Amino acid sequence: MVRTDIEDEDPFRFLGNGGQAAQLIRSFDWSTTPLGPVEQWSGCLRTATSLILQSPVPIVMLWGEDGVMIYNDAYSVFAGHRHPALLGSNVREGWAEVADFNDNVMRTGLAGRTLAYRDQELTLHRKGYPEQVWMDLDYSPVLDENGKPAGVIAIVVETTERVLAERRNREEFQRLQNLFSQAPTFMAMTSGADHRFELINPEYRKLIGNREVVGLPVAQALPEIAEQGFIELLDQVLRCGEAVKRTSERVLLMRTEGAPLEERFLDFVYQPIRDERGTVTQIFVQGSDVTERVRAENHQRLLINELNHRVKNTLASIQSIVSLTLRGTQTKEEASKAISSRIMALSRAHNVLTSENWDGADLRSMVESALDAFYIPGREAIRISGPQLRVGPHAAMSLALAIHELATNATKYGALSNTAGTVDVSWATGADGSFSFRWVEQDGPPVAPSERRGFGSRLILQVLPLELKGVADISYAQSGVVFALQTTVEAISDKPIAGGA
């Protein structure tokens, strides 16, 4: 008799020449599981097992209501220390820490539905301790010969390394963002051939007048920049791959919509950023608004130039004082004393102007300083009155020397030479821009004009009105000397003679 139902001599032939997992399946006693001996396995179970063993992707098959586990070599790596004990175990018991999760998987799969998870976070005990892992999980039912779900196939791809790397990248990016945002300098990042803004920090936003520029090309976001040659600089960095640095660069920016362009001075660098192939893909912009520093430096240079100018003028004034004093005095002692007092008057005027950075001086302060050496203790011999008024450096110096000469004369011959005399110093301005200055002496000894015209007379009657574009007059009344100067507020502000001596 011929046998037609020759049994397969090797019931595990369907495993093929698999790896370690296939060998373990061969040696495992499946009779201890709900699946029973391999000889009793259904065709669909054998086929499904054969398929998962050939896959390089981690796959586990959960068979029957209990979810008996059969998996391939790739899954055994994922299982860690749980392998090989997981083979043939029930999934709810094999992964007891996620039993509820797998219970849902089995119910869903055996109901003929699929499940898919991306970067699913689970806590597994693969190495003897709780471990946070992330996985891409895809579950689908395995149908038996009758088309009914008999098991569930799970494709398991661990994404823990990628998820943690992305998290580190996000944290690093956030850290850089925080540094970027808190940096005291302005920063921006552009990309592409049109230099499109990717990032800007608050300082950069402040610099450009709080305009919304992220996502826009520089030429569109800051059109005034394009007209000043800065796009060409960015093109150069993108093309040549070399950083461009500028110091105290003048830039005109529209910091308020509709307002005229504002002049700013910037220190900045355009730094190329390369990709893994060495191609420049982005440009990092970093710098500082140094407008105040540049303006201070310019102002300092202006002050130094002005100081040089003033020193020359002062030396010329001293030379004139010495020359005219020597010409009008009889003895060396008289000349020395007169020269010293006049230079001291000049020095006091300098002190007032220096305290004001030579921008001008308060007229009252200048008058008080000029008269400081002539006050008489115990009585109010000198009275000063007039509106608050600021005079230019040139006018202040001229007035200070004139007041000194008037006070010196009053001390020698006029109202300040006795115990009863007084001096009224006053000034006033008119609605028409006029300025008048008066020196009025009272109750001093009788005075009369001198036949000899010395330095003081020439200074107050010739030099002073010439310097201040006005007219001066002195009278010798019975009550005392009266000096008057008439000019304009504009003249004493130094405006007509801003470049003069």
Image (cartoon, rainbow, N blue to C red):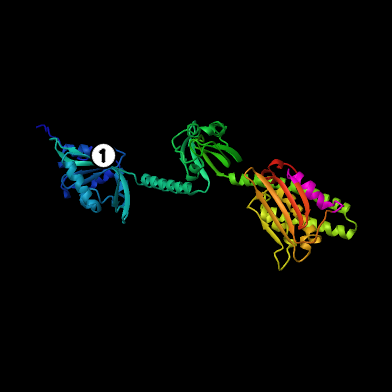
Residue 234 falls left or right of residue 438 = left
- In front here: 429 or 221? 429
- Above or below, comparing residue 332 to residue 117 in the picture: below
Give the farthest residue toward the left. 1
Is residue 469 located in the magenta-colored stretch of the structure? yes
- In front here: 322 or 475? 475
Label total for image: 1
Residue 300: x %, y % from top left:
67, 47
- In front here: 349 or 22? 349
Residue with the mark numbered 1 = 52
- In front here: 204 or 388? 388
Give the farthest residue toward the front. 478
Residue occupying the point 71% across, 68% down: 378
Which element type, helix, strand or loop, lies under badge 1?
helix
Other residues around mark 1 within 10 Å, as few (<14) / some (14–19) / many (≥20): many
Looking at the rendered image, the quarter that the N terminus falls into is: top left
Whether residue 304 is visible: yes
Residue 284: x %, y % from top left:
51, 40
Residue occupying the point 15% across, 37% down: 144
Residue 307: x %, y % from top left:
72, 48
Over which residues does the magenta segment extend?
Answer: 450-471
Is residue 174 located in the magenta-colored stretch of the structure? no
Residue 346 falls left or right of residue 72 = right
Whether residue 394 is visible: no
Looking at the rendered image, the quarter that the C terminus falls into is: top right
Residue 283 falls left or right of residue 312 = left
Please, what is the three-letter code of the amino acid marked with disc 1? Ile
Residue 114: x %, y % from top left:
21, 39
